[in-house]
Amino acid sequence: MKARINGITLAYSDRGTGLPIVFLHAFPLSRTMWATQEEALSRQFRIITIDLRGHGESDAPLWRYTLDQSADDVSALLNHLAIQQALFVGLSMGGYILFAFYRRYADRVKGLVLADTRAQADTEEGKEGRFQMAQTAYKKGPSAIADVMIPKLLSPATIHTKPDLVRQVRSIIEGNQISGIAGDLMAMAERPDSVPLLEQIACPALIIVGELDQATPPSDAKLMADQIRAARLAIIPHAAHLSNLEQPERFNQITADFASEFTKKT
Ligand code: MLT
């Protein structure tokens, strides 16, 4: 499905009925990374997955990107779908966008699932890495970005034993445009420190992390779980950064259990 949002076309899927759960994908992927979650969880809930600006089937304008702008896109899409409040799931960059969203639209958030993400801003070294990666994207294209990213996203065991999954991740990355990839890198480099926000988060939060995640390791997840008032932590064994793809059943179960608590309350 497509909608005209904030001057661009955004692609999204909307499946199932009941409590709306909005899924925000990682860098440099697209909403197709949530296919298994959409399939399983739409039996119980209304699952909305979005191709963020710059990704998948959404427009990728050659212009400035910010995480606040992505948060505004999500809010405008919810208006388009007549959804006032939802549960939000963000993995990695999706989590960074959820911090921006919470700053701007806390009243729309029933609960947060922060998966394989972190509250801290980039270090100077991290920003330099983003700059270099943007140059690689510009000069060599998305397949060079897939080469760099796949070892950061998936565990060595997954890379060696699940070639279909590796191919799937590669093809999602290669489906993105250079303008979107470079735009994201600039947006992530400029994002503020969200650690001070953590103690202001008043809604229930579930923090998920793959035990082998090196991009946003369990120590980052523990920091969020310690500082958000109503947070709990789930560490997924045998998963690295893309824990929803490496251990989908576990990820879906933890998320469904958390979401079910909201339906019991209403
Ligand atoms: C992601 O998975 O979204 C990225 O690894 C986030 C990042 O590069 O900080």
Image (cartoon, grey):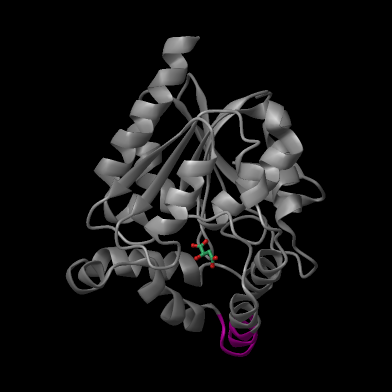
Question: Looking at this rendering, what residue extends furthest in the bottom direction?
Answer: 139
Q: Which residue: 60% across, 81% down?
A: 125
- Is 5 located above or below residue 63 in the figure? above
- As rendered, which of 8 and 133 lies closer to the eye? 133
- As rendered, which of 220 and 110 lies closer to the eye? 220
Q: Quadrant of residue 180?
A: bottom right
Q: Quadrant of residue 80?
A: top right
Residue 147 vs residue 235: left or right? Answer: right
Give x and y (percent) for residue 201: 62, 35
Please say whether residue 204 is visible from this viewpoint.
yes
Residue 174 vs residue 198: left or right? Answer: left
Q: Which residue: 35% across, 37% down?
A: 39
The answer to whether residue 140 is magenta is yes
Give x and y (percent) for residue 158: 24, 66
Give x and y (percent) for residue 231: 46, 35
Residue 1 vs residue 37: left or right? Answer: right
Q: Give the magenta-colored segment's residue range.
A: 132-141
